[in-house]
Amino acid sequence: VERVVGEGRVAEGVVTAGDARGAAWSLELMGQGPALSAADVASGEGVVVRPFAQVADVAAAMRRSRVLVLPSYEDHWGVVVHEACLSGCAIVTTDGVAAAQDLVNPHPPAANGVVTDRDSIADLARGLREVMAWSDAQWEAAEAESLRRARAFGPAVYSAAVGRAVGG
């Protein structure tokens, strides 16, 4: 699943995924707007383009996916990364996505994703190839790590942290 909004690089992501993809992999783009239309991306072999989807449909897509790709130049939090982790997805994103600092562990044996250089399509392709080569054990560890990291965030955790910060 690749998120399509704002600073996402849809055309570059599709080309990169096509270069990195193995026979068993496909790319599902969800969304609409200038980022997608400007990319002139059409559904084809291994690429499915879906228009705007309701929350339940996005959640279902994440549950049936192994990886969220978020190749943004800048994304101050990237709530979609949290949503993907809650679905057990691995993450391939850039150092421009602030959520990566908290939600992506790139270090084996508990790696749940790869953080790439926001200015390098070659590095994005490297990150995709890296996760696509994971063993079954690595995928299991990635799912567990994504879920573990995702549970460390949310309204209750945030509220408690604010309470501690203000002395309440």
Image: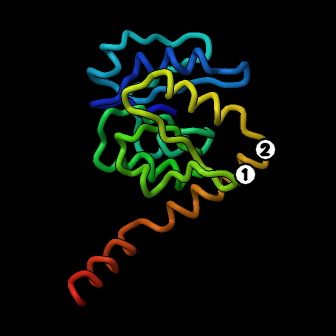
Comparing 145 with 24, the one in front is 145
CA gap, disc 1 and disc 2:
6 Å
As drawn, 80 above or below 10: below
Instruction: Name the residue located 47 percent from the left edge and 36 percent from the top edge.
Output: 116
Instruction: Name the residue located 45 percent from the left edge and 24 percent from the top edge.
Output: 50
* Residue neighbourhood size for the residue with mark 1, other residues' Cα within 10 Å, grouped as few (<14), some (14–19), many (≥20): some
- Going by the numbered disc 2, the residue's amino acid type is Asp
As drawn, 90 above or below 14: below
As drawn, 47 above or below 156: above
Identify the mark at residue 140; answer none if there is no mark.
Answer: 1
Image coordinates of residue 113 in percent, x first then y, are 57, 44
In the drawing, does residue 60 fall left or right of residue 76?
A: right
Q: Secondary structure under badge 1? A: helix
Identify the mark at residue 136; answer none if there is no mark.
Answer: 2
- Going by the numbered disc 1, the residue's amino acid type is Glu
Picture quarter containing residue 161?
bottom left
Comparing 52 with 162, the one in front is 162
Q: Secondary structure under badge 2? A: helix
Q: Are marks 1 and 2 in contact (CB under 8 Å)?
A: yes
* Residue neighbourhood size for the residue with mark 2, other residues' Cα within 10 Å, grouped as few (<14), some (14–19), many (≥20): few
Image coordinates of residue 74 in percent, x first then y, are 29, 38
Identify the mark at residue 39; answer none if there is no mark.
Answer: none
As drawn, 123 above or below 160: above
Image coordinates of residue 3 in percent, x first then y, are 41, 33
Instruction: Name the residue located 56 percent from the left edge and 10 percent from the top edge.
Output: 44
